[in-house]
Image (cartoon, grey):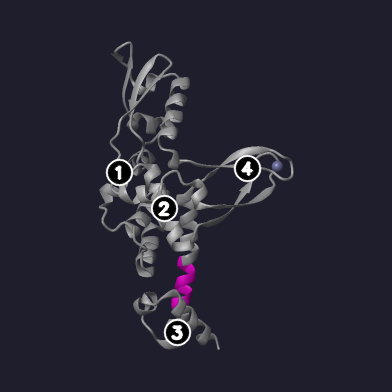
Amino acid sequence: MQMPSAADLLLAWERGLDQSPTRRALALLAACLPGGTQDKLANLSVGARDAHLLRLRELLFGDAVAAVSECPNCGERLDVAFSTNDVRHMGVEKIDADSMKPQTQAHQLHAGGYDIKYRIPTSSDLLAISTADGIEPQLALLQRCVTEVQQNGIPVQTNALPDSVIAAISKDMANADPQAQIELGLVCPECSHAWNALFDIAAFLWNEIHAWAKRMLHEVHTLARVYGWREADILAMSARRRQIYLELART
Ligand SMILES: [Zn+2]
């Protein structure tokens, strides 16, 4: 993984602005994994994708995360602070070594009398189900990722499975790709209610980059107006040098 330049990150942000959350995540991956083609990046498991996004988050903004959650019982807003290391399931070295490994491993499960084979969902699957009309997303994802179902050796359609088996597959899938679902165990200080809150690194990082991009464009605007410099030259400066010029521009 490489630290994207300010210009590349701005470009990724601009490309992702009018896109779905999945395409935004892929635009960010492309900025920090320049060796990966769109296809390769889209065929990473969602967990591998999110492991890379956690790494990118650390490179850009450090490992301390400050988020806000709302108690589902009483509505109290909680400040949640943790480190990216607390929610990482894979070693950093492994993430880099596996950076471009496509998701092809078959998983097997026996549930409710059915023998099931499936693969872990990728960004390609998320993109495909986002355009599938009229099907519940969880079922649409299973239909794509479950490769074989048999009952007593006889093939069975995925959409004929009972809800309990669908739930068992979803649970097994989540366990097989733990980085795809980051859960934070929280306790409300007001009402003592305990719950697991989902932390969506893709959405969280996108919001941070969105705020950064607007700040960066404002800085470019200020420096270009005062000094007449080109956007590309201002973006190519180190953040430290840019900050010093900004301070000087304000005096
Ligand atoms: Zn509460």
Q: Nearer the viewer, mark 1 or mark 2?
A: 2
Determine the residue positioned at 46% across, 29% down. 171
Quick one: label 1 or label 2, which is nearer the N terminus?
Answer: 1
Which residue position is annotated with label 4? 186
Residue 20 visible in this rendered orientation of the protein? no
Q: Distance between the residues labelled 2 and 3?
A: 34 Å
The reply to whether residue 97 is in sight is yes
Label annotation for residue 43:
1
Amino acid under disc 2: Leu
Which residue is rendered at x = 68% and y = 44% of the image?
Answer: 75
Amino acid bearing label 4: Leu
Which is more N-terminal, label 4 or label 1?
1
Q: Position of residue 189 (x, y in %)?
A: 72, 45
SS class of the residue under badge 2? helix
Of circles 3 and 1, the one toward us is: 1
* Mark-to-mark CA distance, 1 and 2: 15 Å
Main structural element of the magenta stretch: helix, strand or loop?
A: helix
* Residue 168: x %, y % from top left: 45, 24
- In magenta, the rendered stretch is 213-220
Say what amino acid the circle numbered 3 marks: Arg
- Quick check: marks 3 and 4 in contact, CB under 8 Å? no
Q: In which quarter of the image is residue 27?
A: bottom left
Q: Which mark is residue 4?
A: none
The residues bearing labels 4 and 2 have C-alpha atoms spaced at a distance of: 23 Å
Query: Position of 208 compared to 14: left or right?
Result: right
